[in-house]
Amino acid sequence: MKQTLNLAPPSAADKEFISRIEEAADTSIKLCYQCGKCTAGCPAAFAMDSPPRQIIRYLQLGLVEEVLAAQSIWICATCETCSARCPRGVDIASLMDACRREALAAGKISDKKVAVFNEAFLNGVKNFGRTYEAGLLIQHNLKTMQPLKDAQLGLPMMKRGKVSILPDRIKGKDQVKKIFQRIETMGRE
Amino acid sequence: MPLGYYPGCSGEGSGIEYKMSTEKTAEMLGIKLQELEDWNCCGATSAHNTNQLLALALPARNLAIAEQMELETVLAPCAACFSRHRATEIKAREDQALRSKIEGIIDMEFQASSHTVSILEWLVNDVGVDKIKEKVSKPLKAMKAACYYGCLLVRPEEYTGFDDNEDPQSMDQIIKATGAEAVDWAYKTECCGAALATSRPEIGAKMIYEVIQNAREAGAECIVTACPLCMLNLDMRQAGAGKQYGVNLNMPVYYLTELVALAGGYSQEEIGIPRHFVEASSYLNTLPAKAAQMEAEEAARQAKAGKKGAAKAADTAEDAEANKKKIDAMIKGFQKNPDKMALRLIQDEERAKILAEIVAADEKKINKLAELMVIDQEKASKAAEAYVTGEIKKREK
């Protein structure tokens, strides 16, 4: 893979980004000595443009744009194998998680499908207090422009009593909605 | 004290068999489950992907409800629900400022005093494998199962911390207690792909396919899981994953609690077996016949071992019979032709002649030499030499 990297010193904003995700992930990228054990054990590395070791290297070099542009951070399934095996104790999975949140906040989402799934999932929780599986799939399909995806599974799911057409609403759904609202307000502050 | 119970959203939908069988398992073990009142979704992966505080606040509301209900321990069968609640209670206990911040967000008192347990911890640590064994009335003998732990029941270790995160054994112990065989395999803690099966199906399909193939290569005839998302992927999406690789995987997948309840005598219908996507009844139905065959083979092996012993005894008797015939032949030889027989024992002609004279006069010595010649020629020669030496000494006197 031919790639040109700008190795000029990172900007103040990039430095700030890196310390923010280190704090959020409660770990240090400086500990990493690039052994590659994280990538070796990653069950999704085969599908990644930049596998975990490379993401950590980008972070060490202050290459924030490359990190946010990588699909890898959205392909990571948070299985935690990398963090469990890292000989230097770097919590790679939490760094990936922090990178996703930063990408979301910055509106720089390299793989929309996962973000759309998360949004649809949380919308159900915000409105009803619980996951609304049917609504989640429909919303995910519409927003990703694939209306018939998994359609063949709908009827069998219903036959098996595994999906309810209507959402399961809890009594305290307003309390849950307020949890979302308070967090949104805090984010704006 | 009843055990707090958080069924989780999937228990009401895609993971309905998990809820049904968990409740039957508790009933079988004589444990009362007290469902948290008006619980909400834990937020799962989507919440921690989106906002850290949201990922803590959603489970915290449930934990605060458990505290209000004075429930010390809460069972969360779903691996993700367990992981999120456990993470929240640990983080809130470690950081008082964070705990009060969460209290403000959920607008409830929250001490982080309760303890969330996974199905594995509950069954192995709280209930105990021996208690499960006691309750098994229909052992799952002849079942060959791959115990699939996946991610969140064993990682991160600072949350789970009770079993090995590379080669866990708790589920294997429970499965063995039901009478089934737990195969040794390499993918027990590999990821099933989680939500990737929905958001990036081509990636998810490969991960599902590899887990199932590895189980099969290790000799498993079914997979056991304790996570509704693993089940959704391995069961509902199995046909699609097989299609991507042009194979029919046809591997039944069971919830751990389904197998415990089945071994405890509950019917397949009561725990939801007919609701699986990959047909799961037939395999269970073949087990009694296979178990009977295993028992018959075992009995045959034992009988064969017994027969072998008898055969050995018979061989000895046959040997003794044959030896006796040979000895008789030797005796006849000594009687008919003592000189020739003596030369077979002693090379020196003069001494051999003396031996022939000795045996002609002593039937007992013939018998002794004949017996020794059949068993051990060397000993027979030595005995013969001794007779001759004795005879010479006698004559010299």
Image (cartoon, coloured by chain):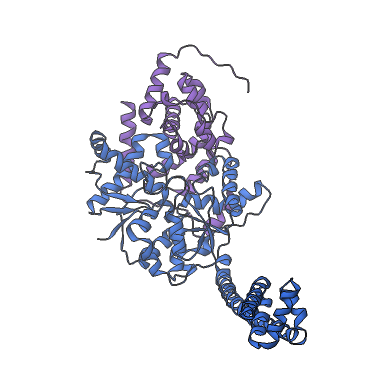
Chain colours: A purple, B blue
Report x, y in % for residue A49. Answer: 57, 29
Q: Residue at position x 23%, y 33% from top?
A: B97
Q: Quadrant of the C terminus of chain B?
A: bottom right
**Residue B162 relative to residue A157: left or right:** left
Does residue A28 appear left or right of residue A182 in this picture? right
| Residue A175 seen anywhere in this rendered image of the structure | no
Q: Position of residue B323 (x, y in %)?
A: 68, 81
Q: Horizontal placement of A8 versus B334: left or right?
A: left
Q: If the image is split into quadrants, where does the N terminus of chain B sit?
A: bottom left
x and y percentages locating residue A119 in the rendered image: 45, 38
On screen, residue B201 above or below A100: below
Q: Residue furthest front?
A: B397
Please determine whether, in this image, residue B231 is positioned above or below residue A64: below
Q: Is residue B8 above or below residue B392?
A: above
Name the spot of residue B353 as percent of width and height, x first: 74, 79
Displayed quadrant of residue B200 = top right
